[in-house]
Amino acid sequence: MDRIVSLPGDGIGPEVTAQARRVLDAVCSHHGLEIEWAEGLIGGSSIDAHGTPLQDEVIELCRGSRGVLLGAVGGPKWDALSVDVRPEKGLLGIRKALGLFANLRPAAVIPALADASALRPEVVRGIDLLVVRELTGGIYFGEPKGRGEEGGVRRGWNTMVYDETEVARITRVAFEQARLRRNHVTHVHKANVLDVSQLWMDVVEEVAKDFADVTLSHQLVDSCAMLLVRDPGRFDVLVTGNLFGDILSDQAAEITGSLGMLPSASLATGGFGLFEPVHGSAPDIAGKDQANPLAAILSGAMLLETSLDCPAGAADVRAAVSATLEAGFRTGDLLLEGEDRPVVGCRRMGDEVLARLGAK
């Protein structure tokens, strides 16, 4: 029996996670996998219940599992809190505590949604790229950091720091992923300005020698941002640090049409991972059955593939999602302006995916 931990979180997190759990239960049953669910609090819901965004008990619960399915954290209710105790601190904390150093964010255009992108359909059609982001180092965790005042002038400072071990580790993940795809890695950097990026250049080149079958290119982060809009089809796997990856992965997600469609996986050594939709907590629609659960459901597919070693189940989920969209079902975020088709809610979308899995 494999334990999976559910951390629904805040806002629409509980709604979309519930649909992902329904789909996972159906697929696991079909493929002969036995799973049991455990549930914990994270983010604002944990602050409300326990006064902290992440309890040690939740970390230990996750450590004893095969994988973690997370919804979303945050919301205006907690915006006035100190940055050290806000909901997002729970997310950063669990990544660090569980050693989740590699964030994988696929951005692929489902044919039925090619017209939903802000870019021309001919530009986005066929896009299938993967952003591999280093998740536990860089400017979000570097020391020193802080705020202060000097000579009557307020100052703030953060430190971007990486060592060669951290860079080599995430680079290997990117090259291994490329071998499963189209054998091309783009390293995104700012080596013309940053010393830390110059270290990345050296280490990435060294790791590349072990992957002679994979082509490596380097791209400045500013020009990469431009190319993601102008010619996104040129990219296969992008690898970069925490800050650049945070920005570029959201940009890549948006060109596919909706953040409500994009899953992600944050992996530790050995295949353990935390799986979550890219979108936020969307508190404005929480509890209204309006959320798009497809990113959470597709995050479940990544969990099947990675933590439960069931690629066939993952393929079933992705096929069911594509078939549901081909059949014309849309949540509000996927509806084009002027488009005349019925809008379904969060649970109904889950029902339709389950129907195409042959279970309801």
Image (spheres, rainbow, N blue to C red):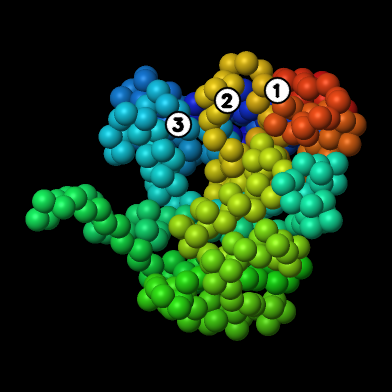
Hey, which quadrant is residue 84 in on the image? top left
- How crowded is the residue under tag 3: few (<14 C-alpha within 10 Å), some, or many (20+)? many
Hey, which quadrant is residue 92 in on the image? top left
Q: Is residue 313 left or right of residue 77?
A: right
Give the SS element for disc 2.
Answer: loop
Give the alpha-carbon distance from disc 2 to disc 1, as whole Å: 10 Å
Q: Quadrant of the N terminus?
A: top right
Q: Is residue 250 left or right of residue 309?
A: left
Hey, which quadrant is residue 217 in on the image? bottom right
- Where does label 3 land, which residue? 74
Give the alpha-carbon distance from disc 3 to disc 2, as whole Å: 10 Å
- Where does label 1 land, which residue? 346
- The reply to whether the C-beta atoms of the residues labelled 2 and 1 are less than 8 Å apart is yes
Give the alpha-carbon distance from disc 3 to disc 1, as whole Å: 20 Å
Query: In this rendering, does residue 177 appear at all?
Result: no
User: At x 70% / y 72%, what residue is drawn?
Assistant: 184
The dot on residue 12 is 2
Q: Amino acid at mark 1?
A: Cys
- The reply to whether the C-beta atoms of the residues labelled 3 and 1 are less than 8 Å apart is no
Residue 42: x and y in percent read: 44, 30
Total marks drawn? 3
Q: Earlier in the sequence, mark 2 or mark 1?
A: 2
Q: Amino acid at mark 3?
A: Gly
